[in-house]
Amino acid sequence: MKRTASARLEFDVDGPAEFVLSIAASRAYAATGTGAAADTARITEEALAVTQHGAPVEVRELHDHHGTLLHLCDVGAGRVTVDYRVVVDGRLDEPAVDELDLVRYRRPSRYCESDTLGPTARAEFGGLEGRELLAAVATWVGSHLAYVPGASAPTDGAVQTLLDRQGVCRDYAHLVIALLRGLDVPARLVSVYAPGLSPMDFHAVAEAFVDGAWHVVDATGLAPRQTLLRIATGRDASDTAFLSSHGGRVTVAGMQVGAVADVLPRDDVSTFVSLG
């Protein structure tokens, strides 16, 4: 499978600020190997440019253990433009299993209050396991929420989402994660490029560890899980936002996201899909 993704972001800044951008494809796709264990996906084209007042802005890179690539830069007051494009050929094997992750992603977090939602999770899904559990949680969340752009606030977590019964992709993912963690199932949030998504935007899904592997759970059903291209992985949206800034006030002035794949398969919520 060949996937192409792009993003053009414009920000207005009222004073000096540090940007932390998380829009690049995971470095997992840049890995290479030999023999039977070699990765089957690779980045064949990639470019990132940050400009302000027509001049390039110097960018620094940071990597985390999931392969998330962060781009840091210092900007002044005025319009900042970010352009990114990547082409990935092929799919990766299943994500690696890290025992520390299995501990970290069972704990409550800022937007996934699994301690509060534990009784709800046990009442609705007690006794379910594996494929049946993931399908049931995805279907339940998808049927209990309405997808309403702009309906949720940036500070809303899973509990508020369930009370409001509406939200966007990150809200769906947070609720899925909180319910699964409430059942002691490790679950985490992944930001992705999503070929087939309409309207096109950055997308967020859950990833759950059952039957010895990580599997994608997307209660929105808005894009085939097989096409998703990993950007960032973390506890919740606090770890995966496309922009974090420190210093001057930042306003999003424009955003265009694109993602296409040469194949758009039919998805089935009852099947396991790994994010590759």
Image (cartoon, rainbow, N blue to C red):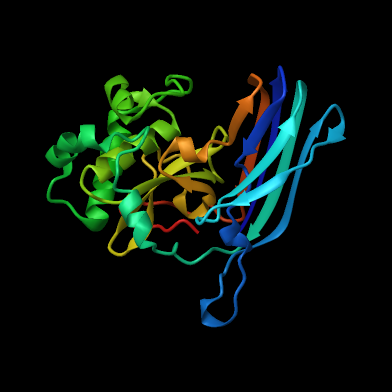
Q: Position of residue 210 (x, y in %)?
A: 29, 58
Nearer the observer, 14 or 158 = 14
Q: Residue furthest top?
A: 14
Q: Position of residue 36 (x, y in %)?
A: 52, 81
The residue at 37%/32% (across/down) is: 111
Classify residue 168 by image quadrant: top left
Q: Would residue 131 appear left or right of 122 to someone viewing this image?
A: right
Q: Position of residue 147 (x, y in %)?
A: 41, 27
Q: Would residue 138 appear left or right of 67 to someone viewing this image?
A: left
Q: Would you say residue 1 is visible in this rendering?
A: no
Q: Would residue 10 appear left or right of 178 to someone viewing this image?
A: right
Nearer the observer, 242 or 199 = 242
The residue at 45%/62% (across/down) is: 95
The number of discs equals 0
Classify residue 14 by image quadrant: top right
The residue at 87%/30% (across/down) is: 54
Give the vertical position of 145 relative to 35 (above or below): above
The residue at 26%/37% (across/down) is: 114
Nearer the observer, 116 or 204 = 116
